[in-house]
Amino acid sequence: MKTILIIEDDIVFSRSISNWLVKKGMKTECVATLANARKAIGQKEFDLILADLRLPDGNSTSLLKWMNEKYYSIPFLIMTNYGQVENAVTTMQLGAINYLCKPVQPDNLLALITEILDKNDNEQEFYRGESPKAHEMYRLIEMIACADISVLLRGASGTGKEHIAAEIHARSHRKKPYLAIDCGAISDELAASEFFGHQKGAFTGAESDKVGLFRAVNGGTLFLDEIGNLSYKTQMLLLRALQEKRCKPVGSTKEYSFDIRLVAATNENLSNSMQNGSFRSDLYYRLNEFTLRIPTLAECREDILPLAYFFLKLTCAKAHKSFRGFDRLAEAALLEYPWPGNIRELKNVIGRAVLICQEQWISLPKEEETQWTEEEKEKALLLQTLEKTGDNRSKAARLLNVSRTTLYEKLRKYHIID
């Protein structure tokens, strides 16, 4: 689900736009000042920013300048009055995607947002992996994509489960729509409304009709991330609807049929959850027509460096920076680190490295070297010396004041050569 940051000091207008976008399947966060916008951008990831040109504490151009300095590359859409169009053009020169004149028409806004997000998605590339486990996973994805069965993705946090769900959808005959939902964000009180929709006036706050996820994604794929976070009560609602392939909006007497492909994901052991009674076994077996296990990054060590260079390329393009690559010591550190946060952690590490590095080659931060064991320091010294000598092992042996035989023994010891 796409998340949009709305920066607007007119609270009524902001809420109106927010409600409209939420009805269209997006998540929103609203702030009224540039200070709160900077705080939000620093704490969360957004797919697009929709900002008024003039705000109580300044002009949106200052926010764009700040984002450029911090290497944030979030699509930026300006709203302005007709008399401020010239200033809006200035924001576009700083990197804003486009501008809209107020009063903003919701349909025009949605069309523009959809165009920007679709273009951004199409420009995204994915590294699919060269390791044996990655090859096997994508072989299975190809096999099940068009089978139209429910799939349960099992994998640790940060392994890319949402990307895999999108891959399954993209390779299926269900081209659109595709919708990803975080089950942890669905409360018991609103679950029926979220999944099945509601009629206007069905409960306090139901100011208009809502379609619901099942009907909104009819004909497509619904991805339920962290399915284990659903309460037992919500699991019952979900199971009944999946069994009957029909749902009834809250406050309505009419039932609607739906046709969706369900992909669910979890980083929990649902077998244990069934045994302790926190997850329904009948729902588990309906979701689990096929289980696809997503390997950890530590299990796909052949992919670590290619992934690191892949993220380096993407991050450099967004930050308008360039590097020759990682030095030998940094590559060794990347390969040896266990990556408990998996692909997400690697991506974040590369992003920080691009931000702080001032040299042509990305190297290991000095403070990390102090935490190494003596063997790690010896291996680092070997790699640094080989780097300096351009892999000339005779020169390296002389610099280290050891014989060529001793040098080769140490290189083999640390698996630098076979």
Image: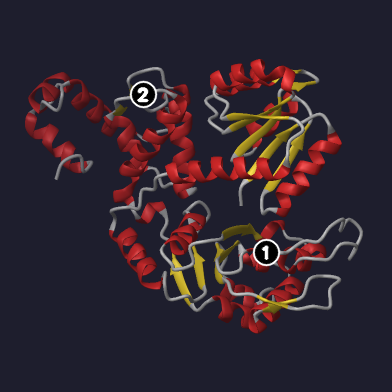
Q: Quadrant of residue 363?
A: top left
Lateral position of residue 82 relative to residue 94, left or right? right
Secondary element under disc 1, as helix, strand or loop, is helix
Q: What residue is disc 1 on?
A: 213
Residue 268 horizontal/vertical position (percent): 57, 65
Task: Judge depth for marks 1 and 2 and give the one in front.
Answer: 1
x and y percent of residue 332 in the render?
30, 37
Q: Position of residue 406 (x, y in %)?
A: 12, 33
Q: Amino acid at mark 1?
A: Leu
Using the numbered discs, state the Cα–Cα distance from disc 1 to disc 2 in whole angstroms.
Answer: 42 Å
Q: Residue at x 35, y 62 (%)?
A: 138
Q: Is residue 71 left or right of residue 89?
A: left
x 41%, y 60%: residue? 295
Q: Is residue 121 left or right of residue 198?
A: left
Q: Is residue 375 visible?
A: no
Q: Residues within 10 Å of mark 1 (few under 14, many from 20)?
A: some
Residue at figure coordinates x 79%, y 37% from the top left:
14
Looking at the rendering, which quadrant does residue 226 occupy? bottom right
Q: Quickly name the residue at label 2.
A: 322
Q: Secondary structure at mark 2?
A: loop
Amino acid type for the residue under numbered disc 2 = Ser
Q: Is residue 55 above or below residue 275?
A: above
Tell me, for residue 179, which label it has, or none: none
Residue 16 x, y percent position in the rendering = 81, 43
- Viewer can see residue 303: yes
User: At 73% from the left edge and 54% from the top edge, which residue is drawn?
Assistant: 23
